[in-house]
Amino acid sequence: MSWRYRKPGAIEGHFSDQLFNARLTGLISVSELKNAVAVTAAKSVMAFRVLTMAVDLCRLTTRTMNVNAGHERTSKARIIHQIQLIRGISRK
């Protein structure tokens, strides 16, 4: 984006927001930040696993996968594996 199209004061507002965030960071301990990052990562991994499992379950229930190619067996194994991983993430 060219400087000609920016609103007046946009850059100053951005830097004042960054300064405010820097002040707040001093109030939060490093361990709290690490915990927040770990929880956020675990939630996104769990959401991805649940989505993948939902696709596999949908294919199994609607019989839209090629049984001869072994997709049904591998999908069942993947669902079981993903449930075990989700249990492990939720216990931590």
Image: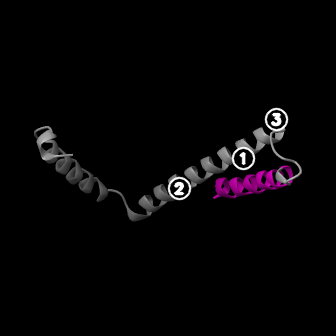
Rendered image: mark on residue 87: none
- Mark 1 lies on residue: 53
- Mark 3 lies on residue: 62
Residue range highlighted in magenta: 72-92
Hey, what amino acid is under mark 3?
Thr
Q: Which residue appears at 61% of the width and 49% of the height? A: 48
Hey, what amino acid is under mark 2?
Ala
- Left of 55 or right of it: where is 3? left
Task: Give the image location of residue 72, x and y in percent.
Answer: 85, 49
- Mark 2 lies on residue: 41
Give me the C-alpha separation between circle 3 and circle 1.
14 Å
Q: Which residue appears at 45% of the width and 62% of the height? A: 34
Comparing labels 3 and 1, the label whose residue is closer to the camera: 3
In front of the other: 28 or 15? 15
Q: Residues within 10 Å of mark 3 (few under 14, many from 20)?
A: few
Hey, what amino acid is under mark 1?
Met
Task: Give the image location of residue 2, x and y in percent.
Answer: 16, 46
